[in-house]
Amino acid sequence: MSASLQNQVEITRHIMRVLDEWELPGKEIIKLLELPNKVRLRNLDRFRDGEAFPESQTTLERIEHIAGIADALRTSFPRNAHMGILWMHTPHRRFQNQPPLSILSEQGLNGLRMVRSELDCAFSWSESLSNYK
């Protein structure tokens, strides 16, 4: 296995672990990652077990945001990883009292950006600069 493919497999496993920790249902995982139509629920186990996600710019962008959210949760709750999971399930005032997971499910890429911006001030600042230009 090439280094690049091995890296893709590791990223896929990591993202699947994060989404599983957040208790996101399989259909929502497929929808959130905007995986190709040919990907079925049964394929998710293959991603957990060592098959890389299909390559697409859309999926890669979503993976980047999911990884950013996971990192920001670890930074926000360094002593208790369960608190990050709880935060994802708890209604939040900035999201009209909806849990962040609902925002991800309902708004896709825009929801990923919204949740990441709430958690990661550096990302939020960077986004505001790119919107300013």
Image (spheres, rainbow, N blue to C red):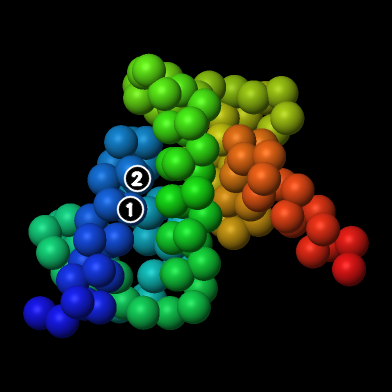
Identified at 59% across, 23% down, the residue is: 91
Pinpoint residue 89: horizontal percent, then vertical percent: 48, 27
Q: Which residue is mark 2?
A: 19
Instruction: Give me the residue at 35% from left, 45% from top.
Output: 19
- Near mark 1 (Cα within 10 A), the count class, few <14, some 14-19 or many ≥20, is many
Tags 2 and 1 touching, CB below 8 Å: yes
Please say if 119 is above or below 84.
Answer: below
Q: Secondary structure at mark 1?
A: helix
| Residue visible at 37% across and 61% down in the picture | 30
Q: Residue at x 25, y 78 (%)?
A: 4
Q: Quadrant of the C terminus?
A: bottom right
In the drawing, does residue 132 fall left or right of residue 122? right
Q: Nearer the viewer, residue 120 or 37?
A: 120
Residue at the extreme right: 132
Q: Badge 1 is on which residue?
A: 15
Asked whether 73 or 122 is in front, the reply is 122
Q: Is residue 67 visible?
A: yes
Does the rendering let one see residue 117? no
The secondary structure type at the circle numbered 2 is helix
